Image (tube, helix red, strand yellow):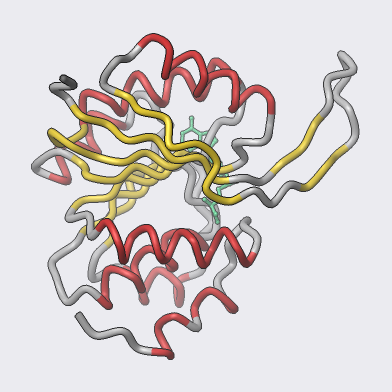
Amino acid sequence: MTFLAQRFHIVHTTPAWMSMHERVLLYGLVAGLQPQRIVEIGTFKGGSTLVMCAALDDLDADGRIVCVDPNPRVAPEDWDSVQHRATMVAEPSPEALASAAEVAGAGFNFALIDGDHTRAGVERDIEATLPTLAEEAHLVFHDAHYFEVREAIDDAVRRHPTLVDAGLVSVDSSPDQPDADGNEVAWGGLRLLRFRRHAS
Ligand SMILES: C[S@@+](CC[C@H](N)C(=O)[O-])C[C@H]1O[C@@H](n2cnc3c(N)ncnc32)[C@H](O)[C@@H]1O
């Protein structure tokens, strides 16, 4: 394991839709949990991919990232910096999860879910991701403050005994205008779930 200051510096420059705290935490989660295979649902400009890739580079291991996004907008120079570990599946979840699992070749140990933020979308992402996971894995959700994301996670934790809720691990919140139905809206927040296929 070789932590390099210049690699960690990516948290300052990456085009991620995440706060600084969230970037640092995401880096730390990957460095700490040392996943061999990561699936990312929702890549956009690759900002979170760059952070996770730098943390995997620090681990000196063969970690891989499979990115799922029907409409990725990763700049060529950014893709160049991650392509030694990353593969893009440019299709929407949940349909893309089968291809993503095939690319990985074995179960994912870590999932970053940051794609369709509707309740139904997050539910679909969770249900499609669970069968692709290794025996033990962690799932991280961005924008967990957003009520639709929060409700979908709460519901999944209730329904799946394989999931343990570690709660919000980054509390940054960006309040927004209420939606058309008057629901309070806030973005941001990382929430962590632990998965064990054979929960005791
Ligand atoms: C908030 S951005 C992701 C930001 C990125 N994770 C980061 O931190 O830099 C959301 C992305 O999700 C993608 N998306 C929307 N629906 C999706 C779906 N069904 N499957 C996969 N990605 C989806 C969008 O194309 C968009 O690029």
- 143 horizontally vs 62: left or right: right
Quarter holding residue 192: top left
Q: Residue at x 24, y 39 (%)?
A: 137
- 82 horizontally vs 8: left or right: left
Quarter of the figure with the C terminus:
top left
In the displayed structure, 44 sits above or below 81; it is: above
Q: Residue at x 47, y 18 (%)?
A: 123
Could you tell me residue 179's position as x and y percent?
Answer: 85, 24
Q: Residue furthest front?
A: 200
Quarter of the figure with the N terminus:
bottom left
Quarter holding residue 65: bottom left
In the displayed structure, 189 sits above or below 119; it is: below
**How many numbered marks, from 0 up?**
0
Q: Residue furthest left?
A: 105
Q: Residue at x 90, y 34 (%)?
A: 177
Could you tell me residue 25's position as x and y percent?
Answer: 49, 61
In the displayed structure, 155 sits above or below 74; it is: above
Of residues 132 and 31, which is closer to you in this image?
Answer: 31
Of residues 58 and 15, which is closer to you in this image?
Answer: 58
